[in-house]
Amino acid sequence: MRFLLLVLLFFSVACVRSQVIIHIDYDKHKPKEDGFSGNVDLSMSMSQAVNFVFGTNNASQIFYSKNKHVLKSLNGLNLTVVNKSKPINDGFQHVRYSYNLTERIIPEAFVQGQYNTNTQVAARYIFGIGGLFKIYNKETDSMQLHLGLHYMPEYERELLGKINRHQRINIMVSWGYTFKNKLKLDLVTYVQPDMLRLSDFRIMGNMALEMPITKNLTYRSSFGWVFDTHPPDGLRPNFFNTRNGIRYTF
């Protein structure tokens, strides 16, 4: 019965209208033990931005922790078929260093690169430096509340050759709740205005629900929403996406 449930969950298909900004599910806690840990996500999806797309989505998060230092590597590689034509792929790479200065204050820096032909992004590179602040996070409580603030320069090259450069501020608010140590709900909102042109900004939201299947395997369903005042040429300013899949944690 559990194997049948796993098969059904893996082949559950999400309906996605568009995705310009890749949402990365950052781990907000220092691993309980030093060493390596992480998770792997697998899902399938359908989407429609400029083209109709069917694809498989694969992502991984790997953490290395030692004392107060945490190094995180997040990767994604998606294989897609556009309008029944030759398959294409898109992906991202994110590396982040965090230092647990205190129980509530975590300075950090990160770099990120991504590309996505379906959303007209040939390359996007981001650098960020700032901190994560644990507003409410007790091991004995099921609720968590975090605030992130970063300075985030951004370079973007569209498929048609247009170059976009931004000096953004990244403001992140994250709320999480675990129901009876089983069902987990996470809500994250990002606001990213350009410091030099405040009329250019992005607002992104993501809601994720996780349900355990086994000790290391969970079913994960997420819904994301993006509003971009200056999207790549040919894309609408606001869109949403949903995705269903499985997550293996090690």
Image (cartoon, rainbow, N blue to C red):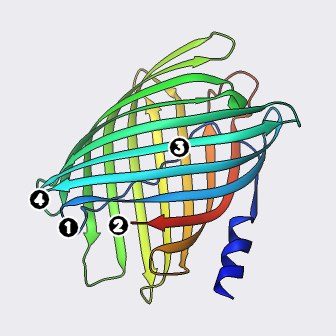
User: Where 236 sits versus 6, above or below?
Assistant: above
Relative placement, left or right, of 107 versus 176 is: left
Quadrant in which the C terminus appears? bottom left
Instruction: Give the number of the mark in front: 4 or 3.
Output: 3
- Is there CB contact under 8 Å for labels 3 and 2? no
Mark 3, residue position:
76
- Report helix, strand or loop for mark 2: strand
- Give x and y (percent) for residue 215: 45, 80
Mark 2 or mark 4, whichever is nearer to me: 4
Q: Residues within 10 Å of mark 2 (few under 14, many from 20)?
A: some
Compare marks 1 and 2 and give the one earlier in the sequence. Answer: 1
Which numbered disc covers residue 145? 2
Q: Residue at x 73, y 40 (%)?
A: 80
Distance from the alpha carbon under mark 1 to that under mark 2 = 22 Å
Label of residue 33 in the image: 1
Relative image position of residue 46 (x, y in whole percent): 78, 50
Q: Earlier in the sequence, mark 2 or mark 4?
A: 4
Q: CA distance from mark 3 to mark 1?
A: 25 Å
Q: Is residue 246 above or below residue 74?
A: below
